[in-house]
Image (tube, helix red, strand yellow):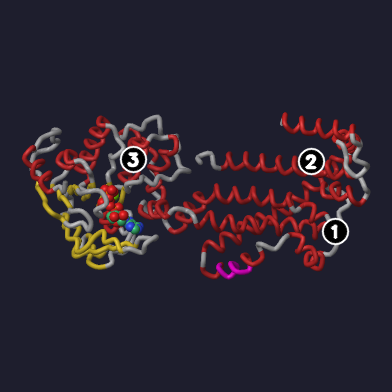
Amino acid sequence: MIRVRGVSRTFVEARTSARVPALDGFELEVSRGEFLAILGPSGCGKSTLLRLLAGFDRADAGLVEVDGAPVTAISPRRLLVSQDPALFPWLTAAENIGFGLRAQGRADPARVEALLVEFGLAGAGGRYPRELSGGMRQRVALARALAVRPDVLLLDEPFGALDALSRESMQALLEATWLASGATVVLVTHSVDEALRLADRVVVVSPRPARVVGSVVVESARPRRAGSHPELRERLMGWAVP
Amino acid sequence: MRLLLLLLALWEVAGRVWPPGPLVPLPSAIVLDAASLLASGELFVHVLRSAVRVALGGGVGAGVGVLVGVALAAGGPGRLFDVPVALARPIPSLAWIPLTLLWFGVGEGQQIAILALATFGVVVAGTRDAIGAVPTAWLQAAENLGASRGARLGVRAQAALPGVLASVAEGFAAAWFVLVAAEFVSATEGLGVLVLAGRDLILPARTFVGAAGLAASAGLTAWALRALRGRLTRWA
Ligand SMILES: Nc1ncnc2c1ncn2[C@@H]1O[C@H](COP(=O)(O)OP(=O)(O)OP(=O)(O)O)[C@@H](O)[C@H]1O
Ligand SMILES: [Mg+2]
């Protein structure tokens, strides 16, 4: 269970020293095992929120709690796949995917191999990140995160660089993995269709500082077809700021 | 290259038409001198002596430089070195001659010390900066995936490696750069000695032979270190 209460985070612009409030009194709850999608305009504070949840950054005020304990440090139980994949350039795709397992002393080449195949990266396991396309890098980053089976998966636009077809298959893969693992997922996306396709609940946030302006529960059975729920789509679009 | 040859040809022709006197050598004289040094095996000895000095001095300077650079980047008590290193950096190698003479006496040790100091100054700063510039995104990603403190140090080291190796290459270039100063006091063989022979023996052509040898040796060292770096950081 994730609980975010009255969280504020203000940045100071380096050149002008101007204060940039990314979050101001932000409120959010996510139940254990829930798949939550967050939609919101660019620059509103979505990545900031995920970084706070992952412990990469600290709130200036308010409470960030996971399973009843405040988030005070980075932990492999809450895994962030950041917007910029941050792959280790000196490791091959396969070594990147295996990094977490190896770091935790449970190296598992068979699992890495299986993940490579699942993520459409068979044959690319021996390549360095600079030899991969942007979409392939995103898939490696997601596979690297899933490899360690986190309790909470924080995904920051993980499919932004993918073509429509591999996006489709990655969504299906993410959904299947989530269903099998029971993890809690917070997915930041710019795609209303992706949100409606995957999430149990979709929240829309305002421009900076982010505030939840609306939320819909998606109840239909999985796997969902693309373009289902035109009425929910209408409601979500209604909250979007032009 | 072609331009260089053309320039040398012009120099030669001009020198034949208006002889400049014995103090300005013509390209042909330089080539002849180089050929005679080569034939007698002397040139090889000079190059070898200098190369050994640069290898030893540069090696010691780079090794200690990397260690101190790591200590500086680690913060804590390592920061104690920060001020002395910063103060010592702009001091030219020539200025170290008196001190190194006092500490090491006349001889090979003093020459190697000059080279080591030059290399050290470059490598210590380069290492510190390379480690400092490692993006936090990688360290956070590593911690997020469950990497221990030690494993994160490994991540930092890997990420800094290209920068550290680049500074080592720069350090060896600096060693070649100060070779003449290092061999100034007491060397009897070496490329710096050839350069100095121009004045000491009034053999101006020999200065050019020495300079060309220096340039070639420095270039070869740079090429070898670049190849090594490419091999160690294939991923970059
Ligand atoms: N380290 C920082 N220093 C200064 N300002 C920052 C910093 N990080 C974020 N900001 C600012 O905070 C605001 C929110 O940034 P954030 O990255 O959370 O937006 P976002 O919702 O993820 O946007 P996008 O959808 O484009 O990824 C932006 O205005 C951004 O400029
Ligand atoms: Mg973002």
Tag shown at residue A161: none
Q: Chain of mark 2?
A: B
Q: Residues within 10 Å of mark 2 (few under 14, many from 20)?
A: some
Residue at the disc numbered 1: B185
- The kind of residue tagged 2 is Ala
Residue at the disc numbered 2: B212
Q: Is residue A213 above or below residue B25?
A: below
- Return the residue found at the far left: A231
Q: Residues within 10 Å of mark 3 (few under 14, many from 20)?
A: many
Q: Are marks 2 and 3 in contact (CB under 8 Å)?
A: no
Locate residue B35, reporting x and y percent: 88, 34
Magenta-drawn segment: B79-84
- The kind of residue tagged 1 is Val
Q: Is residue A191 above or below residue B140?
A: above
Residue at the disc numbered 3: A138
- The kind of residue tagged 3 is Gln
Q: Is residue B133 found left or right of A28 in the rendered image?
A: right
Locate residue B10, reporting x and y percent: 81, 32
Among the two numbered marks 2 and 1 on one chain, the one whose residue lies closer to the N terminus: 1
Q: Mark 2 or 3, which is nearer the eye?
A: 2
Q: Is residue A119 above or below residue B191?
A: above
Q: Residue at x 51, y 69 (%)?
A: B76
Q: Residue at x 50, y 40 (%)?
A: B235
Locate residue A202, reporting x and y percent: 14, 47
